[in-house]
């Protein structure tokens, strides 16, 4: 029998935008394969980023351990990523490295989905949760699901207490390169929410998971219409909001 595991760490919840119309066209097998191929490749992806960017600061001893701490589950149109850290004993350096690898896994998931003409909306939380087999529960998971489902664009937003944890450790000594990488894919933004939400917008830090692809705006618009989906009046604001967010991000990074 699976034991209940109490854990403390980062969680991320994503769902596929326009999944219902994809499913009705019997293309869900292709979609699921894109997601599962990425989830299965998370350890290799983390090793790649270590080799490409961070060997100079000595991450060899940490990368595999952190990669193995990330768990994932796919349920219909939803993906849940979790990682666990020790309840005590870690300093700012270890925690920042942990955030690096977890955020990279989320970043690459969004990137790979865009390559497959799929867009995700999601949220990242932090705190204590429990797991038994493939069953997960806990406040950070609930917070992430609620925030993700309220978004009126494609992107990934930090639950405020999760970003607070990042800020606590982002100045860890000797890890300026890691901090710069996290800053390069995040920015503060007034995120539009669905009209049915209690508020119309939510100011928080956002992670841009679309990379630096050429013709990014065009690719995002194309992803909204892939798999023979139509642009309805309900979908159009999501497209406009996503493009506006990308434009704001690029402007922010160009002037920083």
Image (cartoon, grey):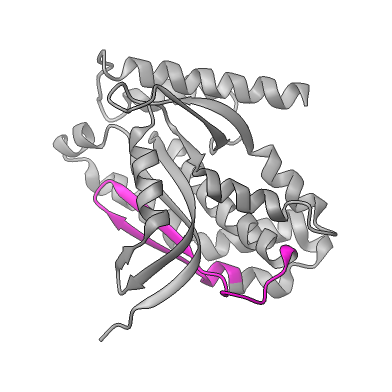
The total number of labels drawn is 0
Give the image quarter of residue 182. Answer: top right
Give the percent coordinates (x, y) of residue 248: 60, 20
- Position of residue 213 relative to residue 111, above or below, is above
Q: Residue at x 45, y 36 (%)?
A: 114
Closest to the observer: 211 or 84? 84
Q: Residue at x 35, y 25 (%)?
A: 224
Give the image quarter of residue 82. Answer: bottom left
Q: Residue at x 40, y 23 (%)?
A: 222
Q: Residue at x 32, y 34 (%)?
A: 17
Q: Quadrant of the C terminus?
A: top right
- Position of residue 139 relative to residue 231, above or below, is below
Give the percent coordinates (x, y) of residue 159: 49, 44
- Position of residue 8 relative to residue 251, above or below, is below
Give the percent coordinates (x, y) of residue 25: 16, 34
Say whether residue 230 is left or right of residue 220: left
Residue furthest bottom in the image: 1
Give the percent coordinates (x, y) of residue 38: 44, 54
Q: Is residue 59 visible?
A: yes
> What stretch of residues is rendered in magenta?
66-92
């Amino acid at each position: 029998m699976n034991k209940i595991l109490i854990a403390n760490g980062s969680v991320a919840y994503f769902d596929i935008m326009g999944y219902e119309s994809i499913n009705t066209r019997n293309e869900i097998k292709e979609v699921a394969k894109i997601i599962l191929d990425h989830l299965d490749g998370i350890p290799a992806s983390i090793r790649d980023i270590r080799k490409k960017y961070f060997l100079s600061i000595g991450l060899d001893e940490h990368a595999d351990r952190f990669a193995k701490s990330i768990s994932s589950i796919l349920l219909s149109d939803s993906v849940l990523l979790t990682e666990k850290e020790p309840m005590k004993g870690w300093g700012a350096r270890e925690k920042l490295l942990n955030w690096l690898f977890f955020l990279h896994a989320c970043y690459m998931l969004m990137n790979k989905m865009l390559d497959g003409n799929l867009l995700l909306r999601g949220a990242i939380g932090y705190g204590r949760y429990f797991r038994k087999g493939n069953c997960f529960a806990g406040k950070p998971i609930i917070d992430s699901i609620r925030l993700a489902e309220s978004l009126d664009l494609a992107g990934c937003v930090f639950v405020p207490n999760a970003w607070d944890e990042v800020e606590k450790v982002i100045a860890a000594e000797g890890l300026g390169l890691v901090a710069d990488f996290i800053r390069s894919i995040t920015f503060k933004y007034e995120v539009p929410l669905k009209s049915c939400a209690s508020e119309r917008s939510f100011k928080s830090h956002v992670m841009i998971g679309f990379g630096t692809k050429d013709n990014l705006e065009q690719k995002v618009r194309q992803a909204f219409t892939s798999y023979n989906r139509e642009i309805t009046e309900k979908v159009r604001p999501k497209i406009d909001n996503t493009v506006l967010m990308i434009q704001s991000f690029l402007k922010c990074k160009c002037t920083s």
